[in-house]
Amino acid sequence: MPNSTALVPGTGGITFVGTDGEDIGYPVKMQIGALSGGLLGKSAAELISLLSMEHRPGQIAPVKTSLSPGLSIRPGHTLKVAYNQVPDSWNQFHYDWRADIRYSAGQLVDFITERKPTNGRWNLVAHSQGGLVIVAASKMMSSPDEFEEYVASVILVGTPLAGTVNSARALILGEQLGKASAPEFQQIVGTWPSIYQMMPAWPAVIDANGNIASDDEQMTEFSAWNAYGHIDPDLIVRTKAVQKMLEDPIGWMMGDIEISILMAKNKYTRVRVQREDDGTFEPDILQKQMGDTLVPHDITQRWVGPHITPFVTTFTGQVNEHSRLFNDPGVVTQIKTLLR
């Protein structure tokens, strides 16, 4: 068929390479493995310098992708262990998943327009944050008609269309490098715009009595983070802008574009976090519902709106948890039936 397929991986699904040629690996301890590449054996100070970013208010592109002198970081390759069911024939869009989602979306726009298949269009298949990049890219086009010119189908797999409590937990706990490195990772992840932008859009903070906390105590307000010194107020401002952009995620996917949203509803998934009297969050006192361990099923659909329901396919059986969705033959088989 004349159409081509491109995978847009999720958070942690793409490795990093330094401009010095060093293979940095992937700086997140996922359930599929531990630290890899050039991160092993580095001191706390080296990790903070290497992996932290610098941004300027009002500028979407990062000022620095690393704080190490004379070094910058670029995307490397797709993490095969996370996407081992993906056919080699698929194109793969590599982006810095730490960056502002709008920055990555702009790069995706360039990718799909500059590499448009001859006499065809793109099937865009996304996992997790990759789906948000596609949504943002659609709205960066001049019109829905322009997006339709380049895209035949959009398949979103485990995409946190309304955010995820897991993202907030990364900012609260900083355990993605392991508990021993939590203080360092708190500082590092506090410089990554995308993590903020994937915080829950719904009221996810509750008080000690289990009631929904006030608006100024919700995670998308800087005032809610007064007890935490590593939170960047500019990145909170960006979060609101991006979450506004992501509202009605399929709104610019009109005309001859087939939309599929694949979600799982078979594992407990966090939906709320408790706020303590001292202003800290207690992420282990929380409420859960069924989802894929990162994206809660019902609250996501409710928050986005019932208009997405006709496009949703829900897996309730023995399907893998969030980070392993593309390791699941059943999920990938379903995706292949949806390609045009």
Image: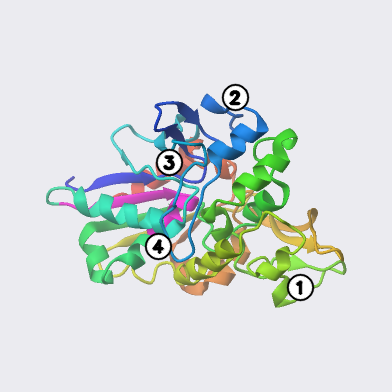
Question: How far is disc 2 from disc 3 in space, using C-alphas?
Answer: 32 Å
Q: Of discs 2 and 4, which sits in the foreground?
A: 2
At label 3, the amino acid type is Val
* Residue located 52% across and 34% down the image: 26
Point out which mark residue 136 bears. Answer: 4
Please say which color scheme the image uses: rainbow
Residue positioned most to the top: 41
Q: Which residue is mark 3?
A: 332
Q: Which residue is mark 1?
A: 212
Question: How far is disc 2 from disc 4 in space, using C-alphas?
Answer: 34 Å
Viewer-proximal residue among 272 and 99:
99
Of callouts 4 and 1, the N-terminal one: 4
At label 4, the amino acid type is Ala
Of callouts 3 and 1, the N-terminal one: 1
At label 1, the amino acid type is Ile
Few, some or many residues within 10 Å of mark 4 (<14, 14–19, 20+): many
Viewer-proximal residue among 206 and 241:
241
Q: Of discs 3 and 1, which sits in the foreground?
A: 1
Of callouts 2 and 3, the N-terminal one: 2
The stretch in magenta equals: 120-135
Point out which mark residue 40 bears. Answer: 2
Q: Toward which corner of the image does residue 207 lie, by quadrant?
A: bottom right
Q: Of discs 2 and 3, which sits in the foreground?
A: 2
* Residue located 48% across and 39% down the image: 13
As helix, strand or loop, the secondary structure at mark 3 comes to helix
Question: How far is disc 3 from disc 4 in space, using C-alphas?
Answer: 24 Å
Residue 285 percent across, percent down from the top left: 82, 56
Question: How far is disc 2 from disc 1 in space, using C-alphas?
Answer: 41 Å
Question: How far is disc 3 from disc 1 in space, using C-alphas?
Answer: 38 Å
CB atoms of marks 3 and 4 within 8 Å: no
Question: How far is disc 4 from disc 1 in space, using C-alphas?
Answer: 29 Å
As helix, strand or loop, the secondary structure at mark 1 comes to loop
